[in-house]
Every structure is written in C-alpha cells, then in structure tokens.
C-alpha cells in the first residue's frame, strides 16, 4: 500500500487568535478594551487596555481652587459620587481642623448610604443583564429612581452630586426627605426579598456564577483589590470599620464577607451590603440630631504646607484622596487612589484558562466603572 503524504498541522498551542473585547461592548460597561488571546473558547491571555476616556481629573486639581475642584470628585465614579466628595471635603477638613456639626455628619452618612444602594442596584441590574436576564435591571432602576428623587430634593442633582461643603453641607434636609427616607427603608427590604426569589435563588444565575472567577485573599493583597471584591474573598475589611470616619462609629452594622472567593460570593456581598446600608440609614434617621449643618470654614481655603490623606468606603472599595499643599489657593498635587483600577488589575491573572462567557460573568462581578479607572 502506498504511504500517505501527511501534512504536519503544527502545535495546537500555536493555533491561537486575538480577540478584542471592547472598547465598545456592553459587558465592559464603558470604553474598556481587553485584548484577549484565545485558544478556541478559552482565554490564554487577557490584557486590559485603559485610557480611552482619560479625563485628567488629578491634573485638573492643580489649576482649580480647593472649592472649584469639588464638582470634579463626583465625576470620577458617578455612581458613587457622594462618597467621593466626602473624601475630598474630609481631607480639607482634616488639614484645616474644621469641626463639622453632628447633624451634617449624620446627613452625610444617610446620603452616602443611599448613594451606595443606588450604585449597587445599577451594578446588580447591569451584571444580570450581561448574563442574559433583562427584567431585573428594570426593577433595579425603578428602585433607584426613588433614591434619586430623595437626593434631588436636597441637592438638585440626580447623578453627579455636589452636596457636601468644607465644614458641612450646602443646605439642610427638609421633612419631605426625612419622611421619604423613613418610608424607603421598609419598602426596599421587601424588594430585597423579591430580588432573592427572582434572581439570587435562580438556578441559572447560580450556575453562571458559582465557582467562576476564583480570587484568593492573597491575590487581592498582591493587586491591592478592595471593597466587595476583597470581602468576597473572605477578608472583612471595610474603611467604615477599619479606619472609622465621619460618625460611622455611632452605628451598628456588619461587614458582609464570604470565603468562597468566586463571582457568587461577590454577588452575595453586594446584596447583603444593601441591607447593611438600610440598617445604617434607619439608625441615622432615628438619631438625627438638631442643629446647624455648616461649621466654621474659611471663605478662601488655603491648606498648610504638607501632605494630607483621607479614606472613605465607596461602593466599589477603598477610596484614598491624598493632596499635597504648598500653602496656595490651588492644590499642588491631587492623587486619587480609586478601587476600580486595582480591582481590574487582577483580571488578567484570574481569567487565564477561563471560558470567554465565564470571563464576562467574572468581569461583571468586579463592578467596574471605567471613568474611575481612566480618572
């Protein structure tokens, strides 16, 4: 029999191809590009490419006065705007030793926690939509509208809030806000029960998230991951407890954390955090003190020469604002240590060997806001 002339096909490992995920893709939640090297449906390499929406927020801090820079803070992570502004006013108040009235601090906590719930609702609804479920995001935005109505009533904005001021707030809350917030707490608790039946206990969702995107506590440490990503890996670290600021020490609340380290653990952390935020709001409204909402702050703000830091727990993790002052009306340097950048950094290592469809589920568990990365 005549021998067959076989053509060598080469090493299958060489039969990879490059696939761009983004920068225009619904699952990237913004103009994020991930350069994927694929072996069939499996990822062999995933390199995030950032900078498509770079806005130079840190650089803008050098040519604005301390007060003029306040609106910038809410545009870094527009879904968690209150806590970003809180960090910036906090660093100035710490540097100038400004005493903030108790009523103002309580209102800051209430509005920050309402903003945290609204942010988690957007992240939850968009994440489930990435997995093919469209209905939950309609419920999420319906509930979020109730929060935005409350916040709009006191500060006139529904997204990029600029409600906090050095020394307090731009104005006090009214009775409509107080009564509306009191009514929202039990309403949202009932909605959370419905969300559990509709989504959390859904076998399809669990199959898409359980065991997907395992991230160890050690990996979080190496990349500096924080927030629900870190707590989903079993580390109960939260700035509100570990580095108490404002009046968070006055409230009783837990830090949800799960040891599994998978996408489902990060999902459960965020859902539990909504309940904890409701606990904090309920306590703060019940104990809301009377008094002024603005302390004594200088009309022209000039920080003493030196470096100053202030950290808050935003919806996606630890935000650290570090400013350097040379004694002038403008900051010499503004540095924003944001959580989305560090949380994204572990994606390349954690997604190696993962199916592309699972990588989409994993990316959703990081709850990325791309302007927060391209700050």
Image: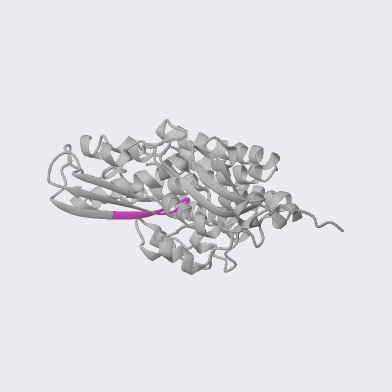
Between 275 and 11, which is closer to the camera in this rendering? 11
Q: Closest to the observer: 313 or 216? A: 216
Left or right: 50 as drawn, with respect to 358: left
The answer to whether residue 157 is seen in the rendering is yes
Q: Is residue 312 magenta?
A: yes
Residue 171 in the image: x percent, y percent? 34, 36
Residue in front for this viewpoint, 209 or 303: 209
Give the residue furthest to the front.
Answer: 2
Position in image of residue 315 (x %, y %): 47, 50
In the figure, 331 relative to 204: above or below? above
Q: Report which quarter residue 165 is drawn in.
A: top left
In the displayed image of the protein, which residue is found farthest to the right?
1
The magenta stretch spans residue 179: no
Q: Find residue 184 and report its horizontal and vertical position in percent.
A: 57, 44
For the C terminus, which image quadrant? top left
All told, the count of numbered labels is 0
234 shown above or below 280: below
Q: Residue at x 54, y 39 (%)?
A: 22
Along the line of sight, which residue is nearer the eye, 299 or 1?
A: 1
Q: Is residue 252 above or below residue 51?
A: below
Tell me the chief SS of the magenta region.
strand
Q: Is residue 170 visible?
A: no
Which quadrant is home to the N terminus?
bottom right
Q: How is the image coloured?
A: one colour
Judge left or right: residue 277 versus residue 52: right
Q: Position of residue 109 (x, y in %)?
A: 41, 50
The quadrant in which residue 226 appears is bottom left
The boundaries of the magenta stretch are 310-318
Q: In the image, what residue occupies the spot 68% across and 53% down? A: 9
């Amino acid at each position: 029999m005549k021998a067959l002339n076989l053509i060598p096909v080469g090493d299958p490992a060489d039969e990879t191809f490059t696939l761009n995920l983004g920068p225009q893709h619904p699952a990237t939640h913004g103009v994020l590009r991930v350069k994927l090297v694929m072996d069939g449906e499996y990822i062999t390499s995933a390199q995030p490419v950032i900078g498509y929406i770079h806005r130079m927020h840190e650089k803008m801090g050098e040519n604005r006065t301390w007060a003029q820079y306040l609106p910038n803070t809410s545009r870094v992570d527009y879904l968690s705007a209150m806590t970003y502004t809180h960090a910036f006013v906090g660093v100035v108040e710490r540097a100038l030793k400004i005493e903030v009235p108790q009523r103002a601090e309580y209102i800051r906590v209430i509005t920050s926690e309402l903003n945290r719930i609204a942010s988690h609702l957007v992240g939850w609804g968009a994440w489930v939509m990435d997995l093919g479920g469209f209905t939950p995001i309609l419920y999420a935005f319906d509930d979020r509208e109730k929060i935005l109505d409350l916040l709009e009533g006191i500060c006139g904005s529904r997204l990029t809030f600029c409600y906090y001021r050095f020394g307090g707030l731009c104005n006090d809350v009214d009775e409509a806000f107080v009564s509306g917030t009191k009514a929202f707490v039990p309403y949202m608790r009932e909605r959370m029960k419905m969300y559990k039946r509709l989504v959390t206990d859904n076998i399809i969702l669990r199959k898409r998230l359980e065991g997907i995107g395992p991230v160890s506590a050690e990996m979080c440490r190496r990349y500096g991951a924080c927030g629900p990503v870190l707590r989903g890996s079993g580390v109960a670290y939260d700035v509100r407890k570990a580095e108490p600021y404002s009046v968070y020490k006055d409230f009783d609340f837990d830090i949800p954390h799960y040891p599994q380290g998978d996408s489902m653990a990060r999902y459960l952390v965020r859902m539990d955090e909504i309940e904890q935020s409701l606990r904090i709001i309920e306590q703060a409204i019940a104990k809301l003190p009377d008094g002024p909402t603005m302390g004594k702050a200088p009309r022209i703000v000039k920080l003493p020469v030196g470096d100053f830091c202030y950290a808050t727990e935003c919806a996606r993790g630890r935000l650290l604002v570090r400013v350097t002052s040379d004694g002038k009306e403008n900051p010499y340097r503004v540095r924003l240590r944001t959580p989305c950048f560090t949380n994204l950094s572990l994606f390349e290592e954690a997604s190696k060997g993962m199916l592309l469809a699972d990588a989409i589920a994993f990316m959703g568990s990081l709850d990325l806001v791309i302007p927060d990365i391209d700050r």
